[in-house]
Amino acid sequence: MHFTWKQLPEQVATLLPEIEERLAPFAPRPHWGKVFATAPEQVRAQYPRLDDFLALRERLDPERVFTNAYVDRLLGS
């Protein structure tokens, strides 16, 4: 699910935890490219095959060309 919002980042950041709390019964997984408030360790726990992905990333992108500080914080470096 995607919410379109105006360029009001402070107000959006304040509202995100409430939106995520109300969506929690549906076990949503945040999109890595969207704004969300869920802590990185909670996001990682929602992907049962994350270790498989990280191994694939290591094999295909050992130089970390396709990463950035945000992705490293979310997935671990």
Image: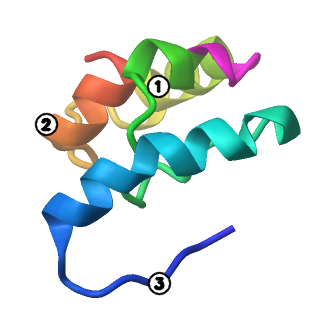
Element carrying mark 2: helix
| Dominant SS type (magenta) | loop
Q: Are marks 3 and 2 in contact (CB under 8 Å)?
A: no
Q: Is residue 47 magenta?
A: yes
Q: Amino acid at mark 1?
A: Arg
Q: Amino acid at mark 2?
A: Ala
Q: Is residue 8 above or below residue 6?
A: above
- Residue beneath disc 1: 59
Query: x%, y% of residue 27?
Result: 80, 34
Q: Are marks 2 and 1 in contact (CB under 8 Å)?
A: no
Figure quadrant of residue 28: top right
Left-right relation of 19 to 33:
right
> Which numbered disc, 3 or 1, marks the residue that appears first in the sequence?
3
Element carrying mark 1: helix
- Residue beneath disc 2: 69
Give the residues in magenta: 45-49
Between 30 and 54, the one lying in front of the other is: 30
Dot 2: within a 10 Å radius of its alpha carbon, few (fewer than 14), some, or many (20 or more) residues?
Answer: few
Figure quadrant of residue 74: top left
Query: x%, y% of residue 22?
Result: 69, 44
The label shown at residue 4 is 3
Q: Are marks 3 and 1 in contact (CB under 8 Å)?
A: no
Q: Is residue 57 magenta?
A: no
Element carrying mark 3: loop
How far apart are the alpha carbons under marks 3 and 2?
A: 24 Å
Q: Is residue 31 above or below residue 50?
A: below
